[in-house]
Amino acid sequence: MTRRDPHLSSNDDQTDRESGVATKTRPRTQRPPLYKVLLLNDDYTPMEFVVHILERFFGMTHAQAFELMLVVHKKGVAVVGVFSHEVAETKVAQVMDFARRHQHPLQCTMEKE
C-alpha cells in the first residue's frame, strides 16, 4: 500500500471541488445590447446631403448610400446601422452636429434593437 502525503491529498480534493464549483456557478457573459441608428425624412434636407452623410459617417459606397437615401425618402425612416450603445450614440451626435452646422433639419435617432 502506498502512503500519500495528507497535504497533497486534501489539496487535490480541494482543487477538484473548486474547479467543479467554478464551472457550475460561472455566469455566462452576455453580448451587450445593440442599437439601431435611424435617419428620418424631412422636406428640407437635400438628398445629396443625406447621401454624403451615409458615405462619411457610415462608410457606405455612393451606390449603397443612394439606395438607402431613397428608402428614407420613400418610407420616412430607415435603419442606417446597428451598433453598440456608445458607437450608436456617437454616430447620432456626429450626424446631428454635421446637419446643424450645414443648417439642415435632418433628424437621426437611435433605439434598442
Image (spheres, rainbow, N blue to C red):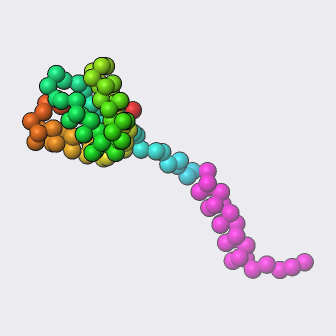
Q: Nearer the viewer, residue 13 or 42?
A: 42
**Quarter of the image with the N terminus in it:** bottom right
Q: Quadrant of residue 32?
A: top left
Residue 12, how many percent across, how many down? 70, 70
Residue 70 is inside the magenta segment = no
Q: Residue at x 83, y 80 (%)?
A: 3
Can you see residue 65? yes
Image height of 66 relative to 59, above or below: above
Image spot of residue 64 (x, y percent): 37, 36
Quadrant where the C terminus sits is top left
Q: Nearer the viewer, residue 11 or 26?
A: 26
Q: Is residue 78 left or right of residue 13?
A: left
- Point out residue 71 in the picture as x, y percentages from the top left corner: 33, 24
State how many labels appear. 0
Task: Locate residue 39: give its quadrant.
Answer: top left
| Residue 94 screen position, x and y as percent | 21, 44
Q: Residue at x 34, y 45 (%)?
A: 59
- Whether residue 35 is visible to the viewer of this picture, yes or no, is no
Magenta stretch, main secondary structure class: helix
**Residue appearing at x 35%, y 30% in the figure:** 67
Residue 22 on the magenta span:
yes
Is residue 9 shown left or right of residue 49?
Answer: right
Left or right of 96 in this view: 35 = right
Left or right: 27 in relation to 17: left
Q: Residue at x 24, y 39 (%)?
A: 52
Above or below: residue 73 compared with residue 55: above
Q: Which residues are magenta?
A: 1-24
